[in-house]
Image (cartoon, rainbow, N blue to C red):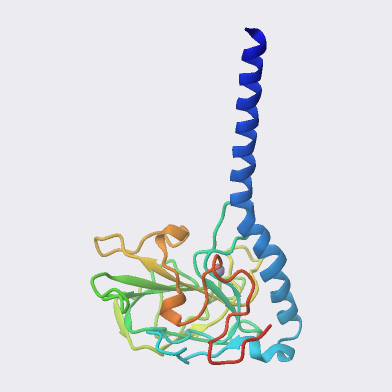
C-alpha cells in the first residue's frame, strides 16, 4: 500500500516538474530569442549604421498599401512581442535612428487627435476615431522617448504639455527621437518607441505597458513586426531588397 502511494507521488512530482519546465520555457523563449538574435544585430547596426544602410526604414514613406506611413527613420531594432526579460513582451516597435538625441524626426503615422498629458516629457498619443483596418472601433497611436536622458523634451513646440485633442494630419512633425528612460544614469539608446493602443470602450486609451492592450502593428505599417512570426529577419518593406 505504501509502495503504491510512493509511486503515485513520484509520478505526480514528475508531472509537476514537466509542467514547470514547459511554463519556464514558454516564458523564457521570447526572451532568449530577443537576446541572441535581435540584440546582437542591433549592436552590429549601431556600431556602424552606414555599413548597413539597407536595414533602415524611411520616415514618411508608405510600405505597399499600408494605412500608416513610417513614423520615423532608422533600424527597427525591436518588434511587437520581443522580450527584454522573462515573462515580459514588448508592446510596440523600437526604431533606432543612429543619431544623437534631437536629430531624427518623428511624424504622425496617421491623422488623428493629439494629446500630451501635462506630465508627459517625452510622449504624445494620437486618437484615431475609426481604425482604418476595422472601422467600427477607435484606436490610439503612442509615440515615446522624445526627450534627452535628463527629460528635456524634443517634442515639437506645437504640442506643449497639456495639449488636448489637437487635430494633426498624417506626416505632421511631432518631434525628434531621444533616449529618455526616466533614469538619467540609465538612458535607453536613441530611438522612437511606437505602439498601437486599444481603446477601453469608453473613449480612453488602455495602459500601453501591457501587450494585451496593444495591437500587432504589422498590417498597419505593411511590415513584418510580429516577433512570433518574424523571429530573426531585418524589418524592411517587402519591395526593398530582402537583407540578411
Ligand atoms: Zn519599445
Residue at 57% x, 71% y: name it. 230
Viewer-closest of 169 and 78: 78
Determine the image quadrant of residue 101. bottom right
Question: Residue 159: in sight, yes or no?
Answer: yes
- Residue 207 location (% of width, % of height): 41, 59
Question: Residue 103: in sight, yes or no?
Answer: no
- Residue 102 location (% of width, % of height): 58, 84
Residue at 28% x, 70% y: name it. 138
Viewer-closest of 29 and 41: 29
Q: Residue furthest top?
A: 1
- Residue 7 location (% of width, % of height): 65, 19
Residue at 62% x, 20% y: name it. 9
Q: Left or right: 222 with respect to 87?
A: left
- Relative to 175, does residue 123 appear above or below in the rendering? above
Q: Left or right: 1 with respect to 123?
A: right
Determine the image quadrant of residue 244. bottom right
Viewer-closest of 146 and 29: 29
Viewer-closest of 191 and 134: 134
Q: Quadrant of ligand 1?
A: bottom right
Q: Quadrant of the N terminus?
A: top right
Q: How many marks?
A: 0
Residue at 70% x, 88% y: name it. 52
Q: Left or right: 204 with respect to 210?
A: left
- Residue 100 location (% of width, % of height): 65, 83
Amino acid at each position: 500500500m505504501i509502495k503504491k502511494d510512493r509511486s503515485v507521488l513520484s509520478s505526480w512530482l514528475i508531472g509537476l516538474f514537466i509542467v514547470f519546465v514547459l511554463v519556464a520555457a514558454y516564458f523564457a523563449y521570447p526572451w532568449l530569442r530577443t537576446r541572441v538574435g535581435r540584440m546582437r544585430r542591433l549592436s552590429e547596426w549601431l556600431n556602424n549604421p552606414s555599413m548597413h544602410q539597407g536595414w533602415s526604414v524611411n520616415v514618411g514613406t508608405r510600405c505597399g498599401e499600408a494605412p500608416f506611413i513610417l513614423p520615423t527613420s532608422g533600424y527597427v531594432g525591436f518588434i511587437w512581442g520581443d522580450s527584454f526579460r522573462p515573462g515580459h513582451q514588448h508592446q510596440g516597435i523600437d526604431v533606432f535612428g543612429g543619431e544623437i538625441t534631437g536629430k531624427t524626426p518623428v511624424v504622425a503615422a496617421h491623422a488623428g487627435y493629439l494629446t500630451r498629458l501635462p506630465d508627459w516629457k517625452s510622449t504624445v498619443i494620437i486618437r484615431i476615431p475609426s481604425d482604418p483596418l476595422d472601422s467600427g472601433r477607435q484606436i490610439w497611436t503612442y509615440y515615446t522617448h522624445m526627450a534627452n536622458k535628463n527629460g528635456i523634451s524634443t517634442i515639437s513646440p506645437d504640442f506643449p504639455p497639456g495639449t488636448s485633442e489637437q487635430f494633426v494630419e498624417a506626416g505632421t512633425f511631432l518631434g525628434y527621437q531621444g533616449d529618455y528612460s526616466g533614469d538619467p544614469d540609465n538612458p535607453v539608446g536613441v530611438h522612437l518607441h511606437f505602439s498601437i493602443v486599444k481603446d477601453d470602450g469608453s473613449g480612453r486609451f488602455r495602459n500601453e505597458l501591457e501587450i494585451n492592450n496593444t495591437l500587432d502593428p504589422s498590417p498597419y505599417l505593411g511590415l513584418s513586426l510580429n516577433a512570433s512570426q518574424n523571429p530573426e529577419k531585418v524589418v524592411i518593406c517587402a519591395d526593398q531588397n530582402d537583407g540578411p
